[in-house]
Amino acid sequence: MSAAAGAVLDTRNGQAARREHILDAAEACFVRNGFHRTTMQDLAREASMSPGNIYRYFDSKEAVVLGLAERDRERGAVLVEAMERAGDKRAVLMGVLARFFFEITREAAILRLDVWAEASRNPAIGAMVERGDEEGRTWLIAMFDTIKTSPECDPAALFDAVAPLMKGIIVSRALAPDYDAGPAVAQLQAMIDAGLAGALPLPHLDLETGR
């Protein structure tokens, strides 16, 4: 490697490290103060950087949140790839879900709730949340379709049944410092197994109204 190429690589690595440092500082600020109350100046103080340096990497709070979301997606992709090399697809799915819900910190859950709340007020954040939700939905439905054990399984209906429980685990983790996700994760896995086997309970149908 030439000296010039090495210098370019060092610069890129340094920029990536500073970007990660800013994202870590932003996560701490958002958890402590909330997204809405946190300013770019707050981020600069937390990161021990000048506001001008912060703006070299992110031009707005929305851009910072997008950066956090992209980092989460990259980490998730690495986790899925690693687990796919280690076992079958059902084991991968159950392992990813269990690991995520057991390992998510209270701080990360609080940040997720704050971003969801901001999505109702901020169109840019709302679009980001909607895009992330759709990516997760698409991945899970495809996975359900791949590993279903019965032709009676409806992957989209199964996702609709388990999605509220998954969000509920995050809410509970954020609100309760000593929350134990074990029972909810076990329930989630049982619901998925039932749905894959085509045994997911159907909504109650009123014979008079047909609804």
Image: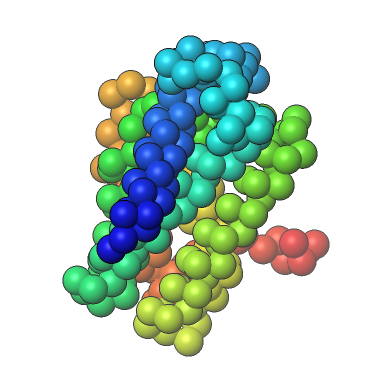
Viewer-side residue, 2 vs 17? 2
> 166 above or below 39?
below
Asked if residue 4 can be seen in this view, the reply is yes
> 79 above or below 54?
below
Q: Quadrant of the rendered structure where residue 94 is?
A: bottom left
> 7 above or below 111?
below
Determine the residue located farthest toward the front in the rendered image.
Answer: 3
Residue depicted at x 43% and y 81%: 146
Determine the residue located farthest toward the bottom in the rendered image.
Answer: 151
| Applied colour scheme | rainbow
Residue 77 at what x, y percent from top left?
A: 39, 60
Determine the residue located farthest toward the left in the rendered image.
Answer: 86
Quadrant (top left, top right, bottom left, bottom right) of the N terminus: bottom left
Describe residue 45's horizontal placement relative to residue 189 as left or right: right
Residue 157 at what x, y percent from top left?
A: 57, 67
Determine the residue located farthest toward the right in the rendered image.
Answer: 209
Viewer-side residue, 177 vs 191? 177
Viewer-side residue, 4 vs 145? 4
Viewer-side residue, 68 vs 86? 68
Quadrant (top left, top right, bottom left, bottom right) of the C terminus: bottom right
Describe residue 175's horizontal placement relative to residue 206 as left or right: left
Residue 43 at what x, y percent from top left?
A: 52, 19
Residue depicted at x 58% and y 42%: 66
Q: Quadrant of the rendered structure where residue 195 is?
A: bottom left
Residue 203 at what x, y percent from top left?
A: 60, 61
Asked if residue 174 can be seen in this view, the reply is no
Residue depicted at x 53% and y 17%: 50
